[in-house]
Amino acid sequence: MKSVVKNLIILLSLVFVFASCDDEGPDTSIGPVTSLIEPANNFSIVLQPTGNDLYFEWDEVKLSGIKYQIVFDHPNGNFSNPVFAIDSDNGGTKPSLSLSPGNLNSIARRMGLLSSEQGSFKWSVRTIRGLEVALATQSNTMTVTRMAGFDDLPLAVFLTGAGTEVGDNIANALIMQRMDEGIFEIYSRLTAGQPYIFLDNNAGEPKRFRYDFEGQVIREEETPMTVAETGIYHIRLDFNSGTASYRQVLRVALFHNSSQVYLWLPYQGLGVWGRGFALTAGGIFDNLPVAETNSSNRPSGNPVTDNLGTDDRYKFRMVSRPLGAEGDVVTEWRTFLPNDAKPGNSPNPNWYYMIERTNVEQWTNNQIWKIQPGAWMGLNIDVTFVLKGDSPYTHTFVIQ
């Protein structure tokens, strides 16, 4: 009996010890952000389409594996179900984030603010590690005046009309690329003096929109628009701010990095540029029209009779002119994802995805493509440059 009691006492002692260890073990929970640096409390901003980004910053939590989220809520909210949440810079790892006026306008709209209306909401930061989440001990209030955009943002936008490439049957209307919430763009040919208009649907009785060039605002109206000059246009509509931008695309070229030679791509229609090239061993591109061998028709670069050599890197350059401006603008189309490898025999389609960039320079590390053989001369190639609204911006490079 004494033995049983003794064993029972030992067992109870062990249970107590383990329980004590659980209660007093090391604290591995994450700590909250304790200080929001900027924007300061009671910050006020009037949003403008051309305004600067707003910079958010807070104290860093000194623990490994931490991710941050900025959370926005109504003035009387407690962030348990925030109106909007977004990861910080660098995939949530940096204690900072920059938001564009369009982003802030979208957040204000989610808060219930109407176009051009002023209102307040608050922001804070969540730290996240695994399943653990900690809300900052501080929140700051900000007052925002919304831009004069649309409250009911279209989910899709289409281009139609006799002045377009597809005519005025709305069933054939061209869908515009959705760039962000309420932001759409298209690359397409328009005919001078012929009507075109934007729709929020290509069936039934869609809403119709036009850009009022005089008032510089998008309006929901039936009245179509026209352009003064036939050409290929890049049109970008921002329903958040009610603004739009137009530019005429003059030329597109495949750009060979090393020699700085331009291989011009004529417009094929429906947002596609392309052509085939025979690159002879002597360095003469034997199927280029005479007009395109004239160096005065190229932004820069060596004569087209230069040998392209063995360097296999390439990208694209676009020459365009903003509507109403006098000078031309050169931009580059480079890889969507960092890339410094050959495509391989069966490349993933996203290897060819493109994004437009404004910093134009000969060498752009990890933002170019390479061809498979490693040398250009002696090849027959077919190149297409595709900016369509129903698919990612991409290109094809086919060696015959």
Image: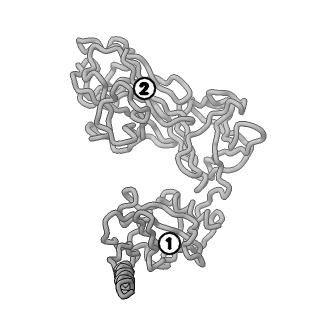
Question: Residue 23, can we see it?
Answer: no
Q: Is residue 232 left or right of residue 197?
A: left
* Label 2, residues with CA under 10 Å away: few <14, some 14-19, many ≥20: some
Residue 400 image-quadrant placement: top left
Pick the front one: 53 or 78: 78
Mark 2 highlights which residue?
396
Residue 225 image-quadrant placement: top right
Helix, strand or loop at label 2? It is strand
Mark 1 highlights which residue?
123
Residue 367, given in percent of the width and then of the height, sits at: 32, 39
382 w.r.t. 134: above or below: above
Sequence order check: which comes first, mark 2 or mark 1?
1
| Residue at horizontal 54 percent and vertical 72 percent from the top | 79
Residue 137, given in percent of the width and then of the height, sits at: 44, 79
355 w.r.t. 229: above or below: below
Residues marked 2 and 1 touching at CB (< 8 Å): no
Pick the front one: 378 or 321: 378
